[in-house]
Image (spheres, rainbow, N blue to C red):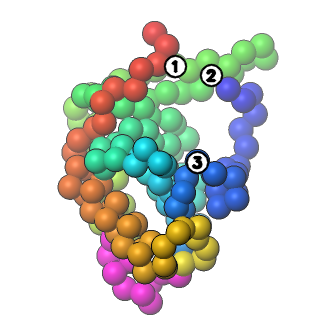
Amino acid sequence: MARQEQDREDLMREATALFPRAEFQLLQHSEPVFWGRKQSGHFSFYFGGDPVYQFDQTGHLRRAFLGGYLYRTQGTTLARLNRVRTEDSSSLQRYDLNAQELAAVLKTMADCFLELQKNLKDESRFQLASFLSEGTEGELLQQIQSDIQLVLQGANQLAPRIRGKR
């Protein structure tokens, strides 16, 4: 784990595990949105550097980066991981969200994707900046919209637990 925070990398250039991938600009947002899909079917959306959402192939949330915190699925809730640094080391402190906190995170996520879905249906509200895909631009946009629909259908469900150190 790095000791120094850095801005997110240039995802279009460096996120080689994500193919296809695309970056687009929503008119009312200052930072671009990045979408990418892994060979496993897992996919991610980066709304600038924060928030970031990562999903399994069924659209269930696996990980998120929100408000400077990393969140990881525990199957029934999310664990918020806080990076604690000393001069010698870096560690993660874990806090499992209660039911109300989890519901709030999932509602915020669903609202974000409802807005994204609405914007992508109106070509005057977004601009595709760049993409890497074997398909056409239209096919790529269909795939992105399909992933958004998966997220919205499973917005109250989490992916199975991601095992971490105990």
Residue type beneath disc 3: Ala
Q: Which residue is mark 1?
A: 93
In the picture, the disc for residue 51 is none
Q: Where's residue 98, x and y in %?
A: 27, 28
Does the magenta portion include 123? Answer: yes
Please identify the quarter of the rendering in which residue 99 is found.
top left
Q: Which residue is mark 3?
A: 17
Tell whether label 2 touches label 1 (CB within 8 Å): yes
Picture residue at 40% right of the left edge, 26% below the top: 162
Crowd tier of the residue under label 1, counting other residues whose Cα lies within 10 Å: few below 14, some 14–19, many 20 or above: few
Tell whether label 3 touches label 1 (CB within 8 Å): no
Distance in Å between CA atoms under marks 1 and 3: 28 Å
Q: Does residue 100 lie above or below 109 as drawn?
A: above
Does the magenta portion include 131? Answer: no
Mark 2 secondary-structure assignment? strand
Q: Where's residue 102, x and y in %?
A: 28, 37
Q: Earlier in the sequence, mark 1 or mark 3?
A: 3
Residue type beneath disc 1: Gln
Q: Where's residue 63, x and y in %?
A: 43, 39
Secondary structure that dominates the magenta span: helix
Picture residue at 48% right of the left edge, 73% below the top: 135
Q: Does residue 144 lie above or below 63 as drawn?
A: below
Crowd tier of the residue under label 2, counting other residues whose Cα lies within 10 Å: few below 14, some 14–19, many 20 or above: few
Magenta-highlighted residues: 117-127
Picture residue at 59% right of the left edge, 67% below the top: 132
Looking at the figure, which quarter contains the N terminus?
top right
**Residue at the far top in the pictured view:** 166
Mark 1 secondary-structure assignment? strand
Q: Which residue is mark 2?
A: 84
Distance in Å between CA atoms under marks 2 and 3: 28 Å
